[in-house]
Each structure stands twice: as structure tokens, then as C-alpha cells.
Image (cartoon, rainbow, N blue to C red):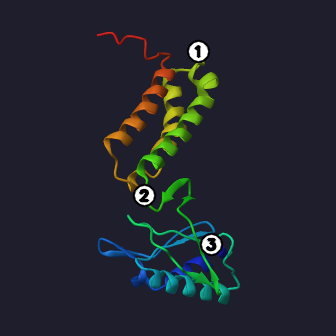
């Protein structure tokens, strides 16, 4: 609770106008637990946000981990970001994972969706012998397990990306494979007309 109050204080005092504009609203920070992502539309604005964030954190006896702090630029062409924290350059990375979603400099949508599909497929595979093939469990119960354990992983962060026909096909394929497993069917089984 105390940590949340401290983070709220820091967030409220960061200059919102330095953030990235989405519609009419500037977004300058995204936080979850003790992770924070600073967002700016230029290197200069990012440096200002980072310096202010660090100053406020220091004033409240908190310290930013230099080893965990990274920068990422999202653009069609490689752009060098030379932000620094307390005189130490921040490592620029081509991609990172935040809350289970992969974020890359070039917004590699197919790679992001493939990663989500693979995670969902692993979960579905783990449930195959114990749940999907369990003849003593009702289909309704199996579907509920699918909807609460596999589908959320499959659709995680989907509202933040523009789907293509290819990515929709990837998602549909793993969903249909799982639904067939729940019903004890394979691709070779014919669908009665």
C-alpha cells in the first residue's frame, strides 16, 4: 500500500505533456507493481521524464535499478537513443517483455502473436491428458477450463495490436485444435452434415 502511494506521488508530479499523444490524451507512464515504463515522443522528452522520475524517487528514498533500466525506440528505421541515468548510459534493446507481452522496436506483430499462440499451446498441451481426454469430466466443465486458462493467454494484449489475416489464422488454429481436443475429435474426423 505504501509503495502504491509513493508511486502515485511520483506519477502525479511527472510532466504529462512530455508523453506520447494518443488521441487527446498524453501517455507518459505505465506502471504495474514495481515496474514502470516511461513513454515519450522524443529522446529529449524521455531524458526529462527519466531525470524527473529519478529525482522524485530519490527524494522518497527509492532507487531506480540501473541494471534493469532499458530503453527501446519504436520506429521503422533504427534510431539510437542516448538516454542516461545519473551519468550512466541506458542500454538500448531491440525488444523486451512487459507483463507477458513482447514489445519490439519494429513492432513485429507476427512474432508477438506467435509467442502468445505458443504459450497457449503449451498450456493446452499440459491439460491434454488430465483434462481434455478425461472421460469423467463434462464437456461444459472442459470448456470452462479452456475459457479461464487457455483463452486469456491466447488473447492477452490482443486489444493493443492490429490483427492481420495471418495473425487471426494463428489464433483460430490453436483455438480449433483445443476445441477438437475437448470434444475428442481430430482433423480426420468428418463433420456430419
Q: Residues within 10 Å of mark 3 (few under 14, many from 20)?
A: some
Kindly indicate the quadrant of the structure image that contains residue 4: bottom right
Q: Quadrant of the N terminus?
A: bottom right
The dot on residue 69 is 3
Whole-percent x, y for residue 154 in the image: 48, 42
Position above or below: 157 against 19:
above
Q: Quadrant of the C terminus?
A: top left
Which residue in the structure is indicated by mark 1?
135
Question: Residue at left 52%, top 84%?
Answer: 47
Is 186 placed left or right of 137 in the picture? left
Comparing labels 2 and 1, the label whose residue is closer to the camera: 2
Which residue in the structure is indicated by mark 2?
107
Q: CA distance from mark 2 to mark 1?
A: 43 Å
Q: Earlier in the sequence, mark 2 or mark 1?
A: 2
Is 191 placed left or right of 52 in the picture? left
Kindly indicate the quadrant of the structure image that contains residue 18: bottom left
Tag 3 secondary structure? loop
Position above or below: 69 against 15:
above
Whole-percent x, y for residue 163 in the image: 34, 47
Kindly indicate the quadrant of the structure image that contains residue 173: top left
Tag 2 secondary structure? loop
Q: Residues within 10 Å of mark 1 (few under 14, many from 20)?
A: few
Is 73 placed left or right of 136 in the picture? left
Q: Earlier in the sequence, mark 1 or mark 3?
A: 3
Q: Nearer the viewer, residue 143 or 72?
A: 72
Query: Dots 2 and 3: beta carbons under 8 Å?
Result: no
Q: Earlier in the sequence, mark 2 or mark 3?
A: 3
Amino acid at each position: 500500500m505504501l509503495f502504491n502511494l509513493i508511486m502515485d506521488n511520483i506519477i502525479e508530479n511527472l510532466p504529462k505533456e512530455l508523453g506520447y499523444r494518443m488521441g487527446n490524451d498524453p501517455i507518459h507512464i505505465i506502471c504495474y507493481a514495481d515496474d514502470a515504463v516511461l513513454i515519450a515522443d522524443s529522446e529529449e522528452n524521455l531524458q526529462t521524464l527519466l531525470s524527473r522520475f529519478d529525482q522524485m524517487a530519490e527524494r522518497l528514498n527509492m532507487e531506480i535499478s540501473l541494471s534493469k533500466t532499458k530503453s527501446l525506440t519504436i520506429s521503422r528505421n533504427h534510431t539510437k537513443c542516448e538516454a542516461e541515468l545519473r551519468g550512466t548510459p541506458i542500454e538500448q534493446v531491440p525488444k523486451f517483455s512487459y507483463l507477458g507481452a513482447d514489445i519490439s522496436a519494429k513492432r513485429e506483430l507476427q512474432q508477438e502473436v506467435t509467442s502468445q499462440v505458443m504459450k497457449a499451446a503449451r498450456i493446452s498441451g499440459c491439460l491434454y491428458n488430465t483434462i481434455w481426454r478425461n472421460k469423467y469430466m463434462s464437456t461444459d466443465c472442459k470448456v470452462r477450463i479452456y475459457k479461464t486458462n487457455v483463452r486469456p493467454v491466447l488473447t492477452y494484449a490482443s486489444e493493443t495490436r492490429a490483427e492481420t489475416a495471418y495473425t487471426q489464422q494463428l489464433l483460430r488454429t490453436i483455438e480449433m485444435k483445443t476445441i477438437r481436443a475437448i470434444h475428442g475429435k481430430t482433423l480426420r474426423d468428418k463433420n456430419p452434415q
